[in-house]
Image (tube, rainbow, N blue to C red):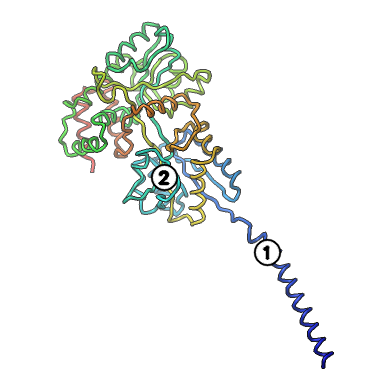
Amino acid sequence: MKFKKAISLLMSALVATTLFAGCSKSSENNTPAQTEKKQVKITVLNSKGEIQTQLEEMAKAFMSENQEITVEVIPAPTGQSPFEKVSSLYSSGNAPTLSMLDPGDVVKFKDKVADLSSEKWVNDSFDRSLDAAKVDGKVIGFPFTVEGYGFIYNKEVLDKVYGGNFDASTIKTQNDLEEMFKKIEASGMGSIIVSPMDWSLGGHFLPLSYATQSKSSDEVNKFLEDLKAGKVDLAQNKQFKGLMATLDIMKKHNISKNSPLSGTYENGPEALATKKAAVWFMGNWAWPQIHELDPENNSYAFLPVPISNDANDYGNSEIPVGVTKYFILDKEQNTEEQQAAAKKFLEWIVYSKTGQDYVVNKANIIPAFKNVTVEPQDPLAKSIKNYMSQGKTLQFMVTLPSDHWSKNGASMQKFLDNKIDVNGLAKEIQEYWKSVK
């Protein structure tokens, strides 16, 4: 009995040892599978075509540091609004993980996007940079680009014209501006090129007459509501009349005044780079084109657009600055893993040195975050940051109706081509606003 019992105990021990060894081996074999990171693919819709290459390079840099995530950057078609493109992708069941939208379109997707309020970068964003991306107290958009615009001038040219260091702060009135144009022309070159695109005239120039109504955003919004209600006589409005008087000065000195509607966007950087003109009304998004044509010259900067002959009037020393593109994060058609990967990508943009460098120095974008320490090499971005640091900024009217620039841009083109006068222009703009629902 003792012998049989001993054999039985020995056999039990051998079985237990074998089972333990098997379990141990199985556990060792399963360890890599348990720790292997799951591959996740996210898509990013880019509606800022001039930085498509830079965004693709940015995605590659991110993927090299986050090898479990694949990022595909999809360009929005030229001529199609980001809102239309994203809407069509939702309809087809292929919503991008991240979509780059114009500010006025962010809230239109409020029921389809993720709440980003608890993300770290929210607390590091500049004041008012999230205004267009908030709904019911929630943050639903990531502010990607800060942009500004005004008169871009070639300081290298103006230094020669003025026989020394040209001081932009001396141009505070319409008279100052015209005297500068005359001085440039007296030196034997053209003073200004006025681009006739409807999006520039209707989307950027005309809104200066709104933004200069008041330093208060609430007052500016009230002015627009009054326009909708037909309570504003633009032909008698000081800011509107003043801005159009400035455009009259620009028209008179335009190097393309004999054919004011024939120009293209490409004519602007070409005129500056070849010194056919010293000044161009445009925004910092034009820097890549200017730099490509004039790579040795980094002395470009911004002048405000004066709207009166009183140097103290609001707008005569300020330029519009604001967030012009936001990312939204889809929660309907992208998995939780994809949403988490997209949040990681956005955080990488804000907090990693690599991400900051790509945004600031490769894509020439001014970030909307206080923590970003990378200084831009782009002189137009530096000029905007200088205006920001001095508090000399106007509201960038980024939430106007989507057809504002096309409808009013057409009216502005008539005025540029002397087909209507300021009263006719005021009437057409008022009629537009009364049609806005």
The amino acid pointed to by label 2 is Val
Does residue 114 sit above or below 231 in this rendering?
Answer: below
Does residue 20 sit above or below 223 in this rendering?
Answer: below
- Front-lying residue, 258 or 177: 177
**Where does the image place residue 127, in percent across and percent down from the top left?**
36, 38
Res. 213 image quadrant: top left
**At numbered mark 1, what does the secondary structure look like: helix, strand or loop?**
helix
Marks 1 & 2, CB-CB < 8 Å contact: no
**Where does the image place residue 349, in percent across and percent down from the top left?**
50, 41
- Front-lying residue, 364 or 404: 364
Residue occupied by mark 1: 30
Res. 125 image quadrant: top left
**Numbered-mark total:** 2
Q: Quadrant of the C terminus?
A: top left
Residue occupied by mark 2: 122
Residue farthest to the right, as pictured: 3
| Disc 1: CA contacts within 10 A as few (<14), some (14-19) or many (>=20) | few
- Front-lying residue, 272 or 319: 319
**For the residues marked 1 and 2, what is the alpha-carbon distance in whole angstroms?**
40 Å
**At numbered mark 2, what does the secondary structure look like: helix, strand or loop?**
helix
Image point 19% across, 26% down: which residue? 424
The amino acid pointed to by label 1 is Asn
